[in-house]
Image: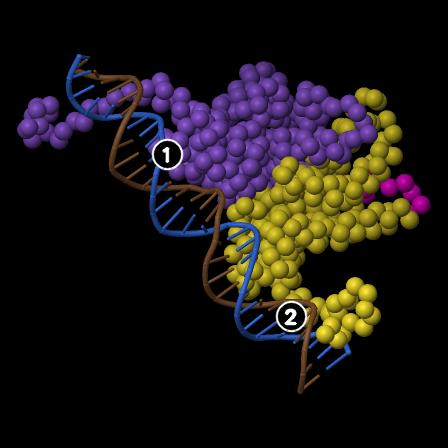
Chain colours: A purple, B yellow, C blue, D brown
Amino acid sequence: MNLRSSSASAPEKPRRRAVSKRSLATSLSILDAAERLFAERGYDGASVRDIAKAAGTQIASISFHHVSKETLFERVVERRASELSQLRLDALSALKTLDTEPTLEALLSAFLRPYLEKAVAGDPQWLAYARLVAMVSADARWHRISERCFDPTAGVFIAEIARLFPHADRSTIAVSFIFSVSSMLSLSTSTWRIEALSKAAGNQPAMDRLADHLVRFCEAGMHAALGAAPNR
Amino acid sequence: MNLRSSSASAPEKPRRRAVSKRSLATSLSILDAAERLFAERGYDGASVRDIAKAAGTQIASISFHHVSKETLFERVVERRASELSQLRLDALSALKTLDTEPTLEALLSAFLRPYLEKAVAGDPQWLAYARLVAMVSADARWHRISERCFDPTAGVFIAEIARLFPHADRSTIAVSFIFSVSSMLSLSTSTWRIEALSKAAGNQPAMDRLADHLVRFCEAGMHAALGAAPNR
DNA sequence: CCTTAAATTGAACGATCGTTCAATATTGAG
DNA sequence: CTCAATATTGAACGATCGTTCAATTTAAGG
């Protein structure tokens, strides 16, 4: 007996195998379905049964691939977070290669636009993710996820802004930055309210116009808040 | 038989009674507990059992006084909504009694400050309500409640702003207004993020400073967005 | 090819959900 | 005080929740 493992005293090496293409596809479709349903109905509102049905698999597969509902949620958020952070940091790097000092507008644009272009414009899967980010950012229940996924990049941009406004204190900058972020997030959560409140004006504002609008709004608001702020 | 109701053919008048003090207290304590728990855990996250326990009554009393969980939620939101609207409209009226045309800053201040003073400053019950408003405003699931409770007053202020900027189109004003509202709401949902992002600066910003900060931010942002907007 | 680790399946678990009901207690009105 | 309308109670309803399991199927490695 024990004919496969050769050496007598060595702890048996249990033979590993690569993941199959089908397995990877199931895992992915679960993430996609979860992203959609979590964004639509919230964490408690979306059941693992509905997620499994939307993904075309069994509920047990969710536990198998993603441990539990909670870690599934975290993985859904984490999946695109690094890509988003990378886009933002790339835009920032591009600014710093220029010989001129980056303006506040350029910094805000570098932070805000990648989200909007991914979110509101094209892929409906990214739009769902955008709503999810808004959910995570607003709910103290998920503050650990925010800390891990979003706060580091936000901190980099806040530090850049602090270099531009050496006399403004950190908390004033942070609050202004939060105002900007929640304005950004409102574009993915409140499209229905925008429609409701701008009715009697038939024309829907286009995506790129909205992005320009947002950047202009935040730049002016932050400039006013930081410029007028006392030095300490 | 039928000795109480006199006339023969008249449909019996079943004798009404006033609500008892105890009954009213129960109904109120249910609303208070629901306000707190809905704000803490969201609609799906807060169970009627927990609400009943927090209110010190039985779960059946919730159905008796407030029909169902959904109408309980609506009543919790509606309860303070009219008071908030009244405060805002009163502030607006006070502005219009002056002989000078109200400024954009004054308009925004009239809309934003009542919420902040009620919410972030004093009563913890109002703070819970503020978080609830943020929840309702962000979730399309409750858009009927927003329409009924908040959009009318918002529409009044948007109309006032439109009078100040006759060349700006309605949707541009509405979008700027949404940016302002979500910045306002972020102060009740994201205090924890503010603390996280402004760390290494020990001083917590005081409440009145935050209100000033918010008004200045929104005024400048909106001014920039509306002033630079094309005329149609 | 064969072996077997990895993956999928369908059923079941106990817990909790919102709601309902008959029985009991309370209380305003006559 | 009397009595019936109102309110509270405790238990139970069926449904759905997230998770777990043994049995089966799939497919990678030698």
**Residue B171: which quarter of the image?**
top right
Residue B227 is left or right of residue B138, and the answer is: right
Which residue is labeled 1 in the image?
Answer: A60
For residue B22, which numbered disc appears in the image? Answer: 2
**B95 and A29: which is toward the camera:** A29
**Residue C24: which quarter of the image?**
bottom right
Kindly identify the amino acid type of the residue bearing the numbered disc 1: Ala
Q: Which residues are magenta?
A: B98-107
* Residue B174 coordinates in the image, percent (x, y): 76, 32
Where A22 falls versus B156 (above or below)? above
Residue B27 is left or right of residue A54, and the answer is: right
Kindly identify the amino acid type of the residue bearing the numbered disc 2: Arg
Q: Quadrant of the N terminus of chain B?
A: bottom right
For residue A22, which numbered disc appears in the image? Answer: none
* Residue A159 coordinates in the image, percent (x, y): 55, 32
**B52 and B93: which is toward the camera:** B52
